[in-house]
Image: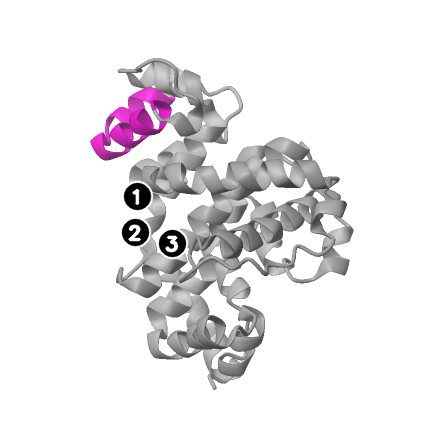
């Protein structure tokens, strides 16, 4: 077991050494922090990064975003997607820079993160309890600490994942058997380093503390949506070795005001989105 007193500070330092977000991504996020920013400024900045520009055009022309006619320039793409969606695409496109390797474990982690982001976005749009793009970013980053632990302690992290995948042990339980600190504490260091809003850091720090979250209803709703999205990923095999029909959603639908008919509709939409959306990122 990795001892907390010896290692938590070390992991925090490791997080500080993570690849920073690409310069263009940092500048886009900084610009979007200004509520009065113009689309022209965003377009000019994104145009300096051909890979990012191509990705935004690809997403804007996808069925996932309801494309009905071909878009060939960035201004039209940004107008179709909206600035918040563009922010989400920019962050998701940059996330793969965090991985030091990209084998099977990393592929499964990535699918879990992007799957949770996509499902959270859908559930948020349906319930209207939180902003859909906040849900996307929260779903994408709520488990980023796992990526850090896998990067820095691959053998230890592999033991955790073996317990999860082979023995059906919940991640938090398997994690506690190997590490003396939660991955979310590390994840909070990451989002703080990357300059995301304090609310996102707080989301990670208190994700598993329902009593603390209930004091801030917006974050509580966000955590509930992301938790439900994680279970959707497990149900449909997104980031898992195979789908699982025995996933228990408990009282999550009730908390979010989702009845049985709506739950079925959401699940079907999420399943379709997984087949369409994962390839976009």
**Residue at horizontal 57 percent and vertical 34 percent from the top:** 132
* 52 to the left or right of 264: left
Closer mark to the observer between disc 2 and disc 1 = 2
Q: Which residue is mark 1?
A: 22
Q: Is residue 211 above or below residue 79?
A: below
- Whether the residues at callouts 2 and 1 have beta carbons within 8 Å, the answer is yes
Q: Is residue 175 above or below residue 125?
A: below
Other residues around mark 2 within 10 Å, as few (<14) / some (14–19) / many (≥20): some
| C-alpha separation, residue under disc 3 versus residue under disc 1 | 18 Å
* 246 to the left or right of 141: right
Q: Which residue is mark 2?
A: 97
x, y percentage for residue 71? 31, 15
Magenta span: chief secondary structure: helix
Label 2 sits on a secondary structure element that is: helix
| C-alpha separation, residue under disc 2 versus residue under disc 3 | 11 Å
* 174 to the left or right of 93: right
**Residue at horizontal 33 percent and vertical 21 percent from the top:** 43
x, y percentage for residue 38? 43, 17
**Residue at horizontal 37 percent and vertical 68 percent from the top:** 150
| C-alpha separation, residue under disc 2 versus residue under disc 1 | 8 Å
x, y percentage for residue 51? 23, 34
Q: Earlier in the sequence, mark 2 or mark 1?
A: 1
Closer mark to the observer between disc 2 and disc 3 = 3
Question: Range of the magenta residues?
Answer: 42-61
Q: How is the image coloured?
A: one colour
Specify the label residue 110 is tagged with: 3
Label 3 sits on a secondary structure element that is: helix
Q: Is residue 130 above or below residue 107?
A: above
């Amino acid at each position: 077991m990795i001892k907390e007193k010896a290692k938590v500070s070390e992991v925090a330092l490791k997080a500080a050494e993570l690849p920073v977000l690409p310069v263009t991504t940092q500048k886009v996020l900084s610009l979007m922090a200004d509520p009065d920013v113009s689309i022209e400024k965003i377009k000019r900045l994104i145009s300096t990064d051909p890979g990012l520009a191509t990705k935004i055009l690809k997403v804007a022309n996808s069925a996932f975003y309801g494309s009905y006619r071909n878009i060939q320039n960035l201004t039209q793409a940004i107008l179709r997607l909206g600035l918040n969606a563009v922010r989400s695409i920019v962050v998701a496109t940059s996330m793969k820079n965090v991985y030091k390797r990209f084998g099977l474990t990393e592929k499964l982690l990535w699918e879990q993160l992007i799957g949770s982001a996509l499902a959270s976005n859908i559930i948020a749009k349906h319930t209207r309890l939180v902003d859909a793009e906040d849900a996307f970013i929260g779903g994408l980053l709520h488990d980023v600490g796992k990526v850090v632990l896998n990067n820095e302690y691959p053998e230890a992290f592999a033991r955790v994942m073996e317990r999860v995948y082979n023995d059906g042990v919940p991640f938090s339980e398997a994690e506690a058997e190997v590490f003396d600190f939660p991955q979310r504490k590390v994840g909070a260091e990451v989002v703080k380093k990357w300059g995301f809003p304090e609310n996102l850091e707080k989301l990670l720090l208190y994700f598993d503390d329902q009593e603390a979250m209930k004091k801030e209803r917006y974050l509580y709703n966000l955590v509930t949506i992301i938790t439900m999205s994680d279970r959707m990923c497990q149900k449909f095999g997104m980031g898992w070795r195979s789908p699982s029909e025995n996933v228990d959603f408990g009282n999550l639908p009730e908390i979010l005001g989702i009845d049985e008919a709506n739950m079925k509709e959401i699940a079907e939409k999420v399943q379709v989105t997984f087949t369409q959306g994962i390839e976009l990122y």
